[in-house]
Structure formats: C-alpha cells, structure tokens
Image (cartoon, rainbow, N blue to C red):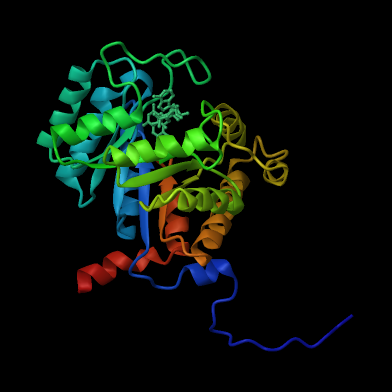
Amino acid sequence: MNARLPLRDPNAPVGAIARASAESPDLKVSFEFFPPKNQKMEDKLWASIEKLAPLSPDFVSVTYGAGGSTRERTHRTVARMVKETDFDPAAHLTCVDATREEIDQVARDYWDAGVRHIVALRGDPSDGIGETYRPHPGGYAYANDLTEGLKKIADFEVSVSAYPEQHPESSNWSVEIDNLKRKIDAGATRAITQFFFSPDIFWRFQDRVLDAGIDIPIVPGLMLQPNFKGLARMSKMCGVAVPDWYAGLFDGLDDDPVTRDMLTATLAAELTAELRDRGVDHFHLYTLNRAEIASSVGRILGLHNRRKAELAA
Ligand SMILES: Cc1cc2nc3c(=O)[nH]c(=O)nc-3n(C[C@H](O)[C@H](O)[C@H](O)COP(=O)(O)OP(=O)(O)OC[C@H]3O[C@@H](n4cnc5c(N)ncnc54)[C@H](O)[C@@H]3O)c2cc1C
C-alpha cells in the first residue's frame, strides 16, 4: 500500500556508504601489493601505485613469497618505493626455510635501504598450506620469535597477523589469542587481519581481543579478489568462511569478469561502510596489484581529496 514517508534533507548522506565518505582526519588506509614477476606485471604494479597515490595511504606493504621465494623481488620493490614514492613501505618477512642469520641479514638490508616497518609472519609450510609446519632448525620458529629478533636488530615498527576466524592451526580461541599476545609482548604494535566477509566476524573477534586486554590497533584486511573461483579456493585453505549468499552472487559469472569486478567493488564498499559506521578507522586493502577496486573503496572512504588537501595546506 502506498504510504507517505517523511522527507529527508536531499543533501544528507543516506546509507552507510554515503556516511562512510564523511571527512575524517583520523581515517587511514593501507594497501598490500605482491612483488611483480616480470616486466609486464611490474608496469601494472607501478601504474596501480600511481593511481592509488592520491589516496595518501598510511603505509603500503609488499608480500614475501612462500619460503622466501620472492626475497630479492620483495626487496627491490620496497627499495624502489622508498626511492621513488612518498609512501611509507612495509616489507613482509617470514620465518620459513631460513636461518636466523639469513633473516637478520634481510632485515639489516631493509634498515639500510631506509625501510622502517616490517610485517612479521611465520609463513606457510614450504610444502604448501595445510601441510605440517616444521620450524627451520636454526631459524625463528614463529612470528613472535621473528618480532623479538627484529626488535633486537633495529627499532623497526612491527605489524603482525591476526585471524578473526582463527588460524587453521590454532586448536581453540585461547591458543589464538595467547599467540597474538605473545607477538605484542615481543614488540608488535599493530595487527592486520586475515580477510573475512561478514562484519560480525570482525566484531566478535574485536570483542575477544578487548576481553583479553589487547589494546593495539586491529586493522581489518579486505580482500579485493574478483576471481571468485580463486577466492573460494584460497578461503578454504585459510579457514575463511565464504557465506552462501556471497557465493550465490557470483554464480554463473565465470566468463564475465566485468560483472565480477563490479560485484567485488560493491561488496567491498558495503563491508567497508558497515565497519566504518561502527568506528573502524583503518582499512588494509589486499589490492592484488590492481587499482580500480581499491581506488573505489578509497573514494567511498572520502580519501580522494586528502592528497589535494595536504598539498594545499
Ligand atoms: C596480514 C597478513 C599478511 C600475510 N603476508 C604473508 C606473506 O607476505 N608471505 C607469506 O608467506 N604469508 C603471508 N601471510 C600468511 C601467513 O604466513 C600464514 O597465515 C601462516 O600460516 C601463519 O603465519 P603467522 O605469522 O600468522 O603465524 P604465527 O602468528 O606464528 O602463528 C601460526 C600458528 O602457529 C601457532 N603457534 C604460534 N606459536 C607456536 C608455538 N610456539 N608452538 C606451536 N604453535 C604455535 C599459532 O597459534 C598459529 O596457529 C599473511 C597473513 C596475513 C594475515
């Protein structure tokens, strides 16, 4: 039945997405990239960086391939960022398949190249995710050991991982939260989360973290992967639940990358806006080295005018 609705101010932001774009000096975004394998991928990465630069990220980070397989490429990418951009780059570093001396040397090389921020991780078993992890006999065993080692080398800022749906190897929540606490005790000052699809997953995790008296920022990681098949595979390996409604939206789109992109951007926008609406003030975007979706999320957060404002100030 038709009913008269109260009229709203046409200029007032209606809905969480519009509200999320309200100017906020405290709001931060960070972007995660992976080191390119060849010249074509390198060109794409740097084009993406150029497009995302106006969003003034708090920092950008570059991943480290399984078992240190991208050691040189990660270093080269991060060192180029230090030289050629205004970004504050963070280098990911893992413990897998390396001695302490080797890792310490990688860290010293970063410090000498001007890198002050490390994302310290244990890393996945070199035989693949899901296989049994065995620490290198002469290496750092877990991310807390690596964090402690890094802090002895230099006064790095250290970020670590956190898992709103538990790391698959944690037998229960107290093991999970105790591990996060150990990493903080070792010197980590920020945790970046594994990706997730429902805001409630993040709120529940935040409650557990607060109950444990943890007070470092827990930054939600948002995955911007439009290839649903790949995303579903990765989610399964990482113990991340993909809700049925989310999967259903991608049904039949295997050969339709444009619609998949649009859906991914829309769903990321909704998740971002919902988190923003309830107080989240830092978002870490897994960009997959593409700018389009990350840039639309940045716009929804009202960040596109920030660089202009900074330059004008
Ligand atoms: C934000 C983010 C960025 C990432 N970047 C990369 C990357 O660049 N390269 C890459 O290879 N991987 C990356 N990963 C994946 C990560 O390496 C894997 O999830 C890995 O399985 C765990 O690493 P962690 O640092 O979280 O491990 P940890 O925090 O060390 O914990 C891993 C597991 O071991 C358990 N544990 C800890 N200490 C002990 C102990 N003493 N004895 C027994 N069990 C213990 C913990 O409870 C947990 O279940 C990233 C993950 C996230 C969330």
Residue pushed farthest left? Answer: 112
The foreground one among 147 and 47 is 147
The answer to whether 205 appears left or right of 113 in the picture is: right
The foreground one among 139 and 113 is 139
Q: Quadrant of ligand 1?
A: top left
Q: Image quarter for residue 188?
A: top left
Q: Residue 43: where, in percent of width, then height?
A: 31, 37
The answer to whether 119 appears left or right of 282 in the picture is: left
The foreground one among 40 and 66 is 66
Residue pushed farthest top? Answer: 137
Q: Is 16 placed above or below 50 here?
A: below
The foreground one among 234 and 264 is 234
**How many numbered callouts?**
0
Q: Is 139 placed above or below 34 here?
A: above
Q: Residue 288: where, in percent of width, then height?
A: 43, 39
Residue pushed farthest right? Answer: 1
Q: Quadrant of the C terminus?
A: bottom left
Q: Residue 150: where, in percent of width, then height?
A: 21, 32
The answer, for residue 158, to whether it is visible in the render is: yes
Q: Quadrant of the N terminus?
A: bottom right
The answer, for residue 35, to whether it is visible in the render is: no
Q: Residue 78: where, in percent of width, then height?
A: 23, 37
Identify the residue shown where x is 50% and y is 44%.
Answer: 224
The answer to whether 235 appears left or right of 121 in the picture is: right
Identify the residue shown where x is 34% and y is 59%.
Answer: 55
Identify the residue shown where x is 45% and y is 12%.
Answer: 127
Q: Is 123 placed above or below 271 here?
A: above
